[in-house]
Image (spheres, grey):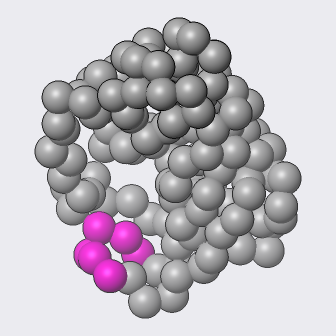
Amino acid sequence: MTELHPQDSPQITPTPLSAPFWDACARGELLFQRCTECAAAIFPPSEHCRDCLAGPPTWVRSAGLGTLYSWTIVHRPVTPAFSAPYAPAIVTLAEGYQMITNLVGTTGDQLRVDLPVQVVFHANLPYFEPA
């Protein structure tokens, strides 16, 4: 669906809190945080658990597998980094958290709720494709 242009991809400016996530993406790994007290999955990164307020959480490697929760098809791109049509989406990861991403390697007519997806990296950004 999306034709990627790595040279035009959005540039990330990591913060001290998000740097471990972006460093892992550069290695082709997807990380999230897990609470050391209640074991809640935490994403996006936080200094404390949103469920029990314990902190700080630990970084854990995700399997990168999940299901499609919601999506839309964009026909007028807001940046030249993406060629229309493309599909921004919310993916529910197997570890129990959700992330906003883009779908690749599929057409709009293949998309459905609970479609199994897996992470792929393009220009150090996590995207998802059908598993």
Q: Quadrant of the C terminus?
A: top right
On the image, the x and y values in percent for residue 24 come to 35, 22
Q: Is residue 34 above or below residue 19?
A: above
Residue, x 17% and y 36% (percent of image)? 15
Residue, x 32% and y 38% (percent of image)? 124
In this rendering, would 113 be left or right of 65? Answer: right
Is 104 in the magenta? no
Q: Which residues are magenta?
A: 78-83
> What is the quadrant of residue 123 in the picture?
top left
On the image, the x and y values in percent for residue 128 come to 59, 47
On the image, the x and y values in percent for residue 83 come to 41, 75
Q: Quadrant of the N terminus?
A: bottom right
Residue, x 54% and y 66% (percent of image)? 88
Magenta span: chief secondary structure: loop
Q: Is residue 99 above or below residue 2?
A: above
- Residue 73 shows in the view: yes
Q: Is residue 112 above or below residue 33?
A: below
| Number of dots carrying numbers | 0
- Residue 29 shows in the view: no
On the image, the x and y values in percent for residue 52 come to 56, 27
Q: Nearer the viewer, residue 70 or 2?
A: 70
In this rendering, would 115 be left or right of 55? Answer: right
Is 82 in the magenta? yes
